Image: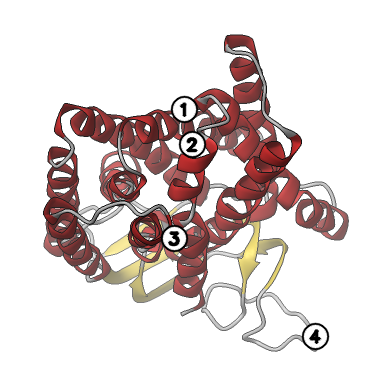
Amino acid sequence: MQGIGLALAAAALFGAAAPACKLLLGSFGAFTLAGLLYLGAALATFAPWWRDLRAEGQPRLDARNFELLLGAIAAGGLVAPVLMLFALRLTLAGDVALLLNLELAATALLGVALFHEPLSRAGWLGVAGAIAAGALVGAGGGWPGWLAAALVAAACAGWGLDNQLTALQSGLTPAGITFWKGLCAGGVNLAIGLSLEPFAARPGEIAAALGVGALCYGASLVLYIAAAQQLGATRAHVGFASAPFLGAALSFAWLGEPLTPMNAAGAALLAASVALLLASRHGHAHVHGAQEHVHAHRHDDGHHLHAHPGLAPGARHTHWHRHEPLAHAHAHWPDLHHRHEHGADDERREGTP
């Protein structure tokens, strides 16, 4: 499935962020580094955003999609990265990397509480396992470890909300979402950082911070957003959940950090939790209301019935398009086309997202 592949590619890039940021914190404060990282993400996504803009015309960013974008910028761009960087000052990069899997639990719980995503018994066990694993990792670092775990948990709550809001976004392409998030959040955090402490970083260090942001946040976010729009935020995060394991492995190999028994136990429990969340799925009869939006799609998925002469059915492409009302039954995830509440009737109706 292409959505899972996109999520795994996003994870590979994001996994390198924790050890790279641990090194960069020697030259920057948390707010300043967060700002540079997200400005790097904006730089990396400007060209694809501009290409999409010229190809498709002005995106139809209505009031609802604008509110979703502002919420994602605030939760996932302004608050979450700063909290994660403060946690990196307190404990090992490998610990922070493993704790970032709490984002999986936060995304799933917010999906259930705020967006009516279904979660099976296996999914609930997976959420509980992720939380327990975070407690194991935090306990291994003493009180600084517990404080770092609390900061990472708060950051993951912000990113979890960002994930859910972004999966609902239908007015901008993934590159556009990432560009505006990086530009706005990066600019604000950089301004806060410069007002709080003197700036003494060298040009090479600034370039390194921008480069890490371009790859670990810019390219990674574009890939993750595309996956979330195909799979839904919770299921896309199942593939993305490999990022903390890669980050921990890089921290042990690259930074020479120790692999403690608590880390090993937490990693094993997190792996089992990911497997349980992957097993959570459902299917039923449902009705799609008419809607218009823009996102990457293909024409062999049963939902995109408009014609493109000469385009292969399995070719993925992006443009503004309209969905006519449609009723069918199939196994699905709560993705961009399946955002509905679950009632007692056999047939559920999905309205415009």
Q: CA distance from mark 1 to mark 2?
A: 6 Å
- Asked whether disc 1 touches disc 2, contact meaning CB atoms under 8 Å apart, the reply is yes
Q: Secondary structure at mark 2?
A: helix
Residue identified by numbered label 2: 76
* Residue 257 shows in the view: yes
- Which residue in the structure is indicated by mark 3? 335
Side of 126 where 180 appears, left or right: right
Residue that mark 4 sits on: 309
In primary-sequence order, the first of circles 4 and 1 is 1
Q: Disc 3 and disc 1: Cα gap in Å?
A: 25 Å
Q: Is residue 24 left or right of residue 174?
A: left
Crowd class of label 2 (few under 14; some 14 to 19; many from 20; radius 10 Å)? many
Residue beneath the point at 72% across and 51% down: 44
Q: Residues within 10 Å of mark 1 (few under 14, many from 20)?
A: many
In the image, is residue 76 above or below residue 174? above
Q: Quadrant for residue 28, please give it.
A: top right
CA separation, marks 2 and 4?
Answer: 40 Å
At label 1, the amino acid type is: Val
- Residue under numbered circle 1: 79
Q: Nearer the viewer, mark 2 or mark 4?
A: 2
Viewer-nearest of discs 3 and 2: 2
Mark drawn on residue 101: none
Which mark's residue is nearer the viewer, 3 or 1?
1
